[in-house]
Amino acid sequence: MYIKLIITVGNIKGGVGKSTLACNIATALSLLSPDSGVLLIDGDKQGSAADFAQSRTDLLGKAGFTCVRAQGKEVVNQVVTMREKFSHIVIDAGGQDNPSLRAGLVVSDIVLVPVAPRSFETWALENMATLIEEATITNPNLKAFGILNLAFPKGSDNDQTHLIIREDYPLLELIEPPVVQRKAFSDAVGQGLCVLEIKPKNHDAIRELGSLLKGIGISEKDIKVIYNGSTKKA
Ligand SMILES: Nc1ncnc2c1ncn2[C@@H]1O[C@H](COP(=O)(O)OP(=O)(O)OP(=O)(O)O)[C@@H](O)[C@H]1O
Ligand SMILES: [Mg+2]
């Protein structure tokens, strides 16, 4: 039996990979079992996650998960009415301090905050941390994770950003290793695939997604099932 997970992928900062990670997580969880029932809520007016689901359906005949678009308190309504029907719910909350992000934080077990290891992105973390703190007043069990995305393949920037998060934002539990900026991630989402499914396989990217799934509480056993599911489909 799976642990039900309601996860918001959110950060006030734009372009840090919220949609990319939300789509990869939702697709990976949908590979756990054809019946696992994953709901991906696209809370962003841009509709990137919904576009991803459409590309996936065009390519494969079906997305393998249900995707709905919802904004603001409609996100809360979706979660409240759908939580019994789905094993996992992933919310792409969109950029900026928007009602969907605030709504997601109130109804989720987990908020995953992608952070790019660049100055503007780390400076913007303060506002995100405040939003999370405010949300925990009504949702005290909300668990907040940070992950570096669009990380550099080498150099000290990733470590420096980890240090900033550890020292200044202890409410964010860091998931390591970082998700590196890799063509495999952008190519995969562009095709409606998660990085487990794209060919040629990029094993570093696959490992990074595996670590991310483990970090948010997916068991090693289920991660193996996900890998096998993606291999079978490939
Ligand atoms: N790990 C990665 N490697 C390579 N490209 C990435 C990675 N993560 C994200 N990208 C690319 O970076 C761009 C921004 O990613 P994405 O749209 O997921 O960010 P976002 O935070 O959802 O943006 P927005 O705030 O506009 O919603 C996209 O072109 C995406 O393909
Ligand atoms: Mg987005």
Image: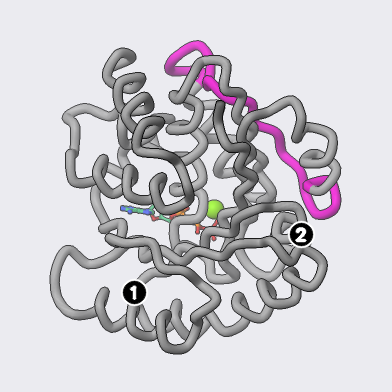
> Residue at horizontal 27%, vertical 19%?
231
Q: Is residue 150 above or below residue 8?
A: below
Nearer to us in this view, 93 or 206: 206
Residue 13 numbered mark, or none: none
Nearer to us in this view, 75 or 110: 110
Task: Please tell me how crowded label 1 is: few (under 14), some (14-19), or many (20+) other residues with Cα within 10 Å.
Answer: many
Circle 2: residue type: Val
Could you tell me residue 65's position as x and y percent?
Answer: 58, 25
Q: Is residue 153 above or below residue 29?
A: below
Q: Quadrant of residue 102?
A: bottom right
Q: Quadrant of residue 122?
A: bottom left
Could you tell me residue 219's position as x and y percent?
Answer: 41, 39
> Residue at horizontal 53%, vertical 59%?
112
Range shown magenta: 57-75
Task: Please tell me how crowded label 2 is: few (under 14), some (14-19), or many (20+) other residues with Cα within 10 Å.
Answer: many
**Which residue carries the number 1 mark?**
117
The CA span between labels 2 and 1 is: 27 Å
Residue 106 numbered mark, or none: 2
Q: Quadrant of the C terminus?
A: top left
**Visual colour scheme:** one colour
Identify the mark nearer the N-term, 2 or 1. 2
Q: Quadrant of the N terminus?
A: top right
Q: Is residue 127 magenta?
A: no
Judge left or right: residue 48 versus residue 75.
left
Circle 1: residue type: Pro
| Callout 2: CB less than 8 Å from ligand 2 | no
> Residue at horizontal 31%, vertical 32%?
196
Could you tell me residue 229's position as x and y percent?
Answer: 35, 19
Q: Secondary structure at mark 1?
A: loop
Could you tell me residue 155's position as x and y percent?
Answer: 14, 76
Q: Are marks 2 and 1 in contact (CB under 8 Å)?
A: no
Q: Secondary structure at mark 2?
A: helix
